[in-house]
Amino acid sequence: MTTILETRNLEMKFGAVYAARDVNISIASGEVLGVIGSNGAGKTTFVNMVTGYLTPTSGEIIYRGKNIIGKATRDITQLGICRSFQIPQLFPELSVIENMLIALTISKQDKPVLFKRAIDSALVDEARALLARFDIGQYADQEIQTLPQGVRKLVDIAMATVAEPDLLFLDEPTSGVSADEKMDFMRTLIAALKTTETAVLFIEHDMEIVEAFSPRCVAFYEGTILADGPTAEVLENEKVREFVIGSEMHRTARPETQEVEATPC
Amino acid sequence: MTKHLDRTELGLLIALPFLILVAFILPKWIVNYVHVSMGTGLVALGVMIQMRAGLVSFGQGLYFCVGGYAAGLMAKFLGVTDFFVLLASGIVAALILSSLLGFLLRRYREIFYAMLTLAVSMILFGLLSSTEELGSTDGFNLPTPSYLGWHPEGETSRLTLYTLTCCVAIGCAIVLNRFLKGPTGYVNEAIRENELRVEYLGTSARQAVHITYVLAATVSAIGGVLWALPLGHVDPEMTNWTTSGQFVFVSILSGTGNIVAPMIGTFILEIVRVYAVEISPNTWQMILGTMMLLTIIFLPKGLWSLFGGKKKSGKSAGADAPTAGE
Amino acid sequence: MLTATAIAVDGLGFAAWLFLSSVGLTLIYGVMKILNIAHGGFYALGAYSSAWAIGVYTTTGSTVALTFLLIPLAALIAGAVAGLIVERGVLKFMYGRDEVLMVLVTYAIFLILEDVTKLIWGTQSYVAWQPAFYFGTVEIFDIPYTVYKFITIGTALVVGVSLLLVLNRTRVGKLLLVVIEDREISGALGINVNLFFTVTFVSGAILGALGGAITAPEISVSPGIGAEIVVLSFAVIVIGGMGSIGGAMIGALIVGFARAASVHLYPPAELFSIYLVMAAVLAVKPYGLFALAESRKI
């Protein structure tokens, strides 16, 4: 397996606070990687930096041998790095199929095209196939804003795959999905994603899911990487147990409404 | 596949001969209203295509005025009377100005976009109002146009200008319809709904806004030329924000569902205005304001949603798609 | 020297007028996130009622001194009545809607208010110069200035300082800051958000009317003044940063001096200069000098 992404000494400061410090991660093509860490540990900040939403204070992000720091989000998408969001970022007043059609249209135009008809039957077929892959075909004609969170999450992830990424970040894919549905949800998801050769990094709070779906795991704590390695080892790591899993225990006891991250991270 | 016309485009093409025929059948005063409404209708279209991206321009009068004045200046200082040259000068002026201003405006959204478009249009208003060479607030007159060396007079001139106006207006509407259903048109819908996602899908939202702004400006300038020629007059009032407000009014009233709606809306408004101003000159704006409030509250997608049958523009686009290609 | 003094005094005069005319707009935006185009309507109502009241009063031949009570009284009544009707009658039902939609709603209200003004006072001009010359003039470097101009400047200062004091030093002001920060949470804390909105909107309307009322003696009050002030006050609050009272002060000073400078140095550029300044400010600070930073979405 070849490395497709490597970060070197990535650092992000907000004022005097480090949201990321000495973050060194390498991801191989096609691998599945789970990221754990309590709220504010710097997981989303890491994704934001790699996808160009935030520019790191210092460090390097090497994608396929090239430093991509300073590139705009859209350019990074075009290079093949995509993401989903903790709070789904969709087109709320449009239906699921329209969301997909628009996403496909946009991702297919690498420079502005003005007067060519955008949507044809082939594109509709493509959108329907994509929905079928994520098992949300039955919602095709419903407006996003009327759908339950779990379906929105899947639409959000499906949308992140329209550009056929080589590297996909999933930001808490199971947040907002009820506890007893999480396993099935992830199964659907991983099955859909494994039809491609995409490397997947997902942020997750549920250790069982991390254990079940990712062979490798990275633990974040206060902007730094606490542990990185085979999932079983990382979850057994003492520091991880103390700082990450311990706090997660408290966390899972809290109601779901606490999920929305207010801190800039 | 792209060569095929959709229903709206086909409808517009079929409507063209009838629209021209109107000039020979209906009384002259109605024809005159149809004529000038095509000019202002194009400006309303310019407002409407920006609205698709969620952007409300309270300064579209700027390009209405730029078009009219560009044609007027060509005639006044260079003695040009040719319709096509006058039209082209309006287009070129708008293209240059909007391409430059677009770099500033594409950074703004929502109320800032509304305010800054308004402010920019008022700069021109201020400039023109204090330029005595151009007649200050009174503006100046335009000559009767000629056509590639042909100088028709009287009734022939009026009918020629009318026919050409119909052709240009319908042509613009078809082009804009294409634009709305093209990739950048869909980027606009996405920008209205969620700009962050647009960037994450790999496209520049600002670039799409810039393109839309330039296109809207060009169409509005064409509207300005087409409006100024039959009236034979331009004045700074064209770029006053209250004029722009009326274009916004038409777009709100007719909705963004279909390209034809603002054209028809403009004509109806023109006719209502004639009667309202005659019957009760001091309540005309009150009628406008009330209609606008009622539309916003009860018909948020505009009057067009009453006969469209389909609730949304996007929905109809998605549903039409498979048949459109066949 | 002469020109410099003229620019300074006129600039201050313009700035005072602009601040009074736009502070209500920025207050309403700051609290309610409504860019209120109808503000121009309140301004016009204030100007008309003040000019009309002064006119009616002076025909009785009584002392002009009392007109100085009439001006704020006219503004208070016009602003409060119109503000209440607009807020309770229309805006109340639209809270929480898109900001752009609210612009369109207030534009519709502006159109209606324009005609209400015409229906009440007709389309002729009103001139109510008496208060402006009651205190006579003072000469600075041989240029006469009406004392009234300095009264306007003083009023603007008093209004600005008291607004800042109310917002920052009183309990009500602090509660208002909470409402601005988070409507839902302040509602949950037991703060009557709707009452705050009503009071804010009516206060904004009264301030707009005051701007018109205090200017009335210096101008010819005629249709169209509302549309004009909308544009100028937009420029002021955009430069300062929307929703900031201090920003409106700075914005008014900048616009006021820019306008005074061009009036004395190159009159044709009068309107142009204002927007030139605005464009320059926005090129450096895209959301104005004192704009609050946007929070991140993801």
Image (spheres, rainbow, N blue to C red):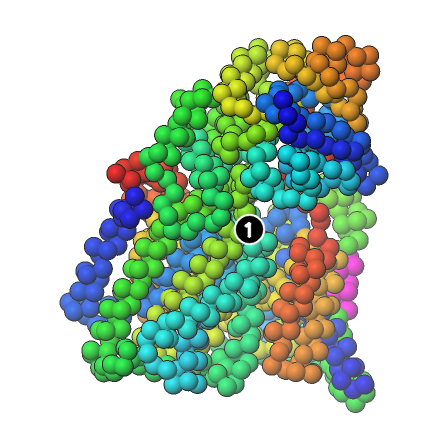
Where does residue C66 sit, x and y in percent of width and height? 70, 73
Provide the major secondary structure of the magenta segment: helix
Where does residue C264 sit, x and y in percent of width and height? 69, 83
Q: Where is mark 1, residue-wise?
A: B206
Q: Taking A11 as reference, is A174 above or below it?
A: above
Q: Is residue B6 visible from the viewing direction of this image?
A: yes
> Relative to the observer, which residue lies in front, A246 or B124?
A246
Residue shown at the point (67%, 75%) measured from the top left: C259
Residue C159 covered by magenta stretch = yes
Residue shown at the point (56%, 55%) measured from the top left: B106
> Relative to the observer, which residue lies in front, B11 or B44?
B11
> Relative to the observer, which residue lies in front, C62 or C30?
C30
When asked about the image quadrant of residue C192, the answer is top right
Residue shown at the point (50%, 67%) measured from the top left: B96
Q: Is residue C210 visible from the viewing direction of this image?
A: no
**Image check: C144 left or right of A131?**
right
Where does residue B87 sit, x and y in percent of width and height? 37, 71
Q: Which chain letter matches label 1?
A: B
When asked about the image quadrant of residue A69, the answer is top right
**Image check: A132 left or right of A180?**
left
Residue shown at the point (69%, 83%) measured from the top left: C265
What segment carries the magenta color? Answer: C154-162
Classify the position of the N terminus of chain A by image quarter: top right
SS for callout 1: helix
Where does residue A214 sit, x and y in percent of width and height? 64, 15
Classify the position of the C terminus of chain A by image quarter: top right
Residue C253 covered by magenta stretch = no
**Image check: C26 left or right of A219?**
left
Residue type at mark 1: give it: Arg
